[in-house]
Image (cartoon, helix red, strand yellow):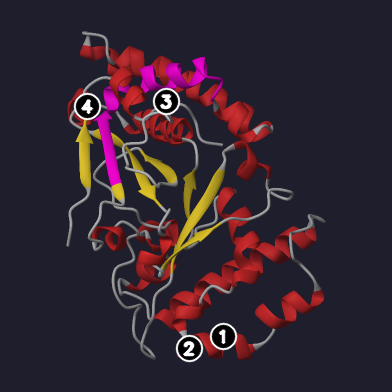
Amino acid sequence: MNSVQEINVDKAEEFWDILSPTKPMFPEPYNLIYRGQRDAGWPLEPSVFREHNNPIIEFNSKIPTAYQQISSELDSFRKFLEYCDKIGIPLPGDSHQFREIHFNSSRMLNNYLHNAYLWPHPDLYELMAIAQHYGLPTKLLDWSKYSYVAIYFAASDAIDNINKITSPGNFDELKKKRLAVWILNIENKIHFPALEIVRVPSGYNKNIANQEGCFTLLRQSAEVNKPFNGSRFHDEFPRMLPDNYIKKVTVPVMEAVKLLELCESHFISASTLFRDFQGAARAVKDDLNKSKFLQLMKPDANMVNKILMPQEA
């Protein structure tokens, strides 16, 4: 198995420059997508598989069978539909027939029992994309066609993580951390068919357009009453290819404030990526987190205990 090519830099300006759209880092032909993560040590793992998001693992401490996992995800989407119904919010692709086929019949679920690779059905993609963008864990993994959007999310999430710092010791640990932007070349998708590239219309989901977004979806097989086969990490499959299809660029999290300033100088912020009340609120939160970050960087470590922690809504 090939290892991911990792490029480590020390300064925000170098990180920004190396990820410039004019410097693709791949030989032609290429078609690149980007994903930012606040921790360079994290794999490319969909939110639904993260332990704190998976009620089956959280309560049972066991890896769920594929059937249990699919049932849990379907139930989440069913409830999402129901709550949207209660407040009169329309959803893409929704209809009586759609609900009968995918949510009100055991036939489809039984089909997944014997053909787990078919989960999820493409009819569900638009619903999943909206649910994901509003915080519901899914099998989808967010990417952007624009590298600087990925930088924004990595830097914003890294700074937001500072809210957890309550002592100088924790801050010392943070200084050792690095954030990352992953780059995936999807030009020759035929080489990894299990990793599906999902694009959905932006009519019901303006975030897709604002962020030039798309998703990856890893299809996995499973035996009856067994967990999904293979790895759930999306970075595993490109590693198996003979050519280099995936790279990771990292920089110390201490450069996150400078990265956000670079994003803002290119008109990339929460307010432009979300363009709603949520985006405006997140932009304010970014400003507050930047101020806190700069306070933490002061030589007087006692300042740590004087910083007011932003309150979650």
What separation in Å lies between label 3 and label 1 (alpha carbons)? Answer: 45 Å
The residue mark sitting in front, 3 or 1, is 1
Residue type at mark 2: give it.
Answer: Leu
Looking at the rendering, the stretch of residues picked out in magenta corresponds to 247-268
* Element on which disc 4 rests: loop
Which of the two discs, 4 and 1, labels the residue nearer the N terminus?
4
The residue mark sitting in front, 2 or 3, is 2
* Residue at the spot of label 1: 109
Residue type at mark 1: give it.
Answer: Leu
Q: Which mark is residue 113?
A: 2
The residue mark sitting in front, 4 or 2, is 4
Q: Is residue 55 left or right of residue 304?
A: right
Residue type at mark 4: give it.
Answer: Val
Q: Dot 4: within a 10 Å radius of its alpha carbon, few (fewer than 14), some, or many (20 or more) residues? A: some
The residue mark sitting in front, 4 or 1, is 4
Q: Nearer the viewer, residue 284 or 129?
A: 129
* Image vertical order of residue 282 relative to residue 194, above or below: above
What separation in Å lies between label 4 and label 2 (alpha carbons)? Answer: 46 Å
Q: Marks 2 and 1: in contact by CB < 8 Å?
A: yes
Q: Is residue 281 visible to us here?
A: no
* Residue at the spot of label 3: 309
